[in-house]
Image: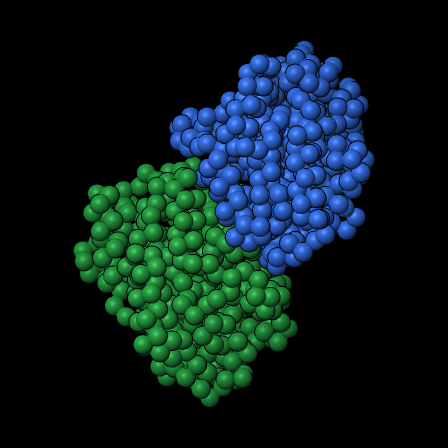
Chain colours: A green, B blue
Amino acid sequence: MNAPRFLILADRDFGPLTSKTANSIVRYLPDRTVAVLDSQLAGKTAQDVLGYGGAIPVVATMREGLAFKPEAVLIGIAPQGGRLPEHWRTWLAEALDAGCDIWSGLHTFLADDPMLVERARANGRKLLDLRKPPADLPVASGRAKDVDPLVVLTVGTDCNVGKMTAQLQLVDKLRSRGMRTNFVATGQTGIMIVGSGISVDAVVSDFTAGAAERLVLEASGDADIVLVEGQGSINHPGYSGVTLSLLHGSCPDALILCHQASRVYLGDYREASWVKIPPLTDYIRWYEDIGSAVHPTKVVGICLNTYDLDDAAARDAIARAERETGLPCTDPVRYDPAPLVDAIMAVRSRLSR
Amino acid sequence: MNAPRFLILADRDFGPLTSKTANSIVRYLPDRTVAVLDSQLAGKTAQDVLGYGGAIPVVATMREGLAFKPEAVLIGIAPQGGRLPEHWRTWLAEALDAGCDIWSGLHTFLADDPMLVERARANGRKLLDLRKPPADLPVASGRAKDVDPLVVLTVGTDCNVGKMTAQLQLVDKLRSRGMRTNFVATGQTGIMIVGSGISVDAVVSDFTAGAAERLVLEASGDADIVLVEGQGSINHPGYSGVTLSLLHGSCPDALILCHQASRVYLGDYREASWVKIPPLTDYIRWYEDIGSAVHPTKVVGICLNTYDLDDAAARDAIARAERETGLPCTDPVRYDPAPLVDAIMAVRSRLSR
């Protein structure tokens, strides 16, 4: 799938921590991103707001955005409460009238909105609900443990720490070492970037591990290494079930533990200061212990997101994580991903996969 | 909800381990069960097949079953592959024509079958899809940790070991000790028995913990003790995500670990002898360690299903489990549930809940 030229809708929420989907599209598909709509930040560039994305402009209205001739409007944030606000629906109708498709990764499906369905039909445009899972998913059977490639899953200390980004940063590096490497998208943003995958958090829970298994099987035919995008965290009160389904369904041989160095509490519950993030060694024990109950697995490296630290603090945090865990650590966005690439190559060699 | 008079459909699968839903209806609603349909066991009684259920007859055809004047046909087994076999659909239509409602706990919904919908409408009867979740479930917020009652969750070494049954055996005993006790059904069979609940395994995985949280909040208003029906197992390759969502969403103060004494491998994968059931102490560590990452919790007792052992072997298995774990253990169906009731009362007293 070739990505269209996107106008990203991120109104009143464009920012490093608030617009995860928008940001990843800006990071990985900058050449396909014509503008970002955020009425509060209009006049800035993506670079101003995120620290990357270059001159991609931020605009205030749909009309201004459409002037950049996008082929699709991509919903880059989740609206409060999950329902599309009325003025978004007006904007999306305007975009359909201007000849754009709409890409959405929301739990509420555009195809369930009769007005948008009718407007898309009238204009011959498409509504893409990328979070909608296939209808025929199985209960996991364990077949993912028998695939030939080395399977590597990212796991996290929280949501939104960089599990997908970590994997995407490794794909090219592994390929440059001669490894046929496939990335498996398990969330709506990854699906938007690579054009395939299943948003496992939108799957009925009896079949969530089965979805992960199917993705690994499909990605294994022509690969030496399969990188599976992780979701959530094993101690996240809302999403831990998604995380464990992915861990058991994908049967990874190796795990990369992802953490945002400056984060103290789980982000979704920050106001309550409820769930404090424990030491990385607790997470390593949890993931290895529970993961290996189904298929033997080891954490082989730490991916540290240091986007909000200065260089000295970032290097210090990386060194500290290495001392604490005894594992190689890097921020693969900011620094050389080689320590994680080396760790994956080493485990592949050790397991002869 | 007052249960109607049921004819249970369990064709070619009625048996102690194969027809979980049918068996629980026979056990807990024997006075509402007029017959069981299984063409291979016709002529026997429920008592013959299950060891309980008394004179409830097994019949060969829908016509014979309808002669017992049921008010509803209850689908008591899951068909292979999930889809309703064609001859079941014919039987269900026959039952609708005879004035019965249809109760189903399947993942595939009766309401999606146009023929059955039309036939129900024509006869003024209802199709009840008890596994269909409410549409407006939230992401878990952690509010279940703040409820007043003591929350007790059953957890298991596998599916189908007696997690629901354990709780149901305790309800009356706790009430007889003066405890206002509510049972929370989290699966289709429990919902059929008590008339309310959410089948959490049919909920989209981002909202599964939220479903558990809502159930606990709803059950807490007028209770001293809330017993939450557990699902699956934390090391089950297909269903572990459901289990963990329930563990984190319901924020239990205490856990009862349920095991079938004679089981060696996880049942769904028995042919492959894939996942061997590890020692009970492994499960205790897993459930306490991962559960307490969100809300402090302890395993306070062991519920041992000994249905297929003779008395001496059953008592021996119970004694062995007590020695291994240092926890009180009983088979609450076969013997006095008091050890588990005492354990719950003790933890309630210790926590002053």
Return the x and y of residue B107 as percentages of the image width and height.
Answer: 59, 40
- Who's the residue at 67% across and 56% down the image? B146
Viewer-proximal residue, B78 or A252?
A252
Q: Can you say whether A223 is above or below B305 in the image?
A: below
**Image quadrant in which you'd find residue B277:** top left
In front here: B145 or A230? B145
Task: Check the image and name the residue furthest to the bottom.
Answer: A43
From where the camera sits, is residue A348 visible? yes
Residue B125 showing in the rendered view: no
Name the residue rendered at 42%, 26% in the picture: B271
Report the front residue among B227 and B289. Answer: B289
Q: Quadrant of residue B117?
A: top right
At a point 51% along the width and 65% down the height, the residue shown is: A265
Residue B310, image quadrant: top right
Quick check: B35 left or right of B83? right
Give x and y (percent) for residue B23. 65, 25
Give A89 or A333, whichever is nearer the viewer: A333
Rendered location of residue A208, percent (x, y): 49, 47
Image height of B231 relative to A348, above or below: above
Q: Is residue A129 left or right of residue A288?
A: right
In this rendering, the count of numbered labels is 0
Q: Position of residue B343 (x, y in %)?
A: 65, 36
B272 to A121, vertically: above or below? above
Q: Which quarter of the figure is the N terminus of chain B placed in?
A: top right
Above or below residue A199? Residue B307 is above
Q: Residue at the spot x=66%, y=32% of the render?
A: B340
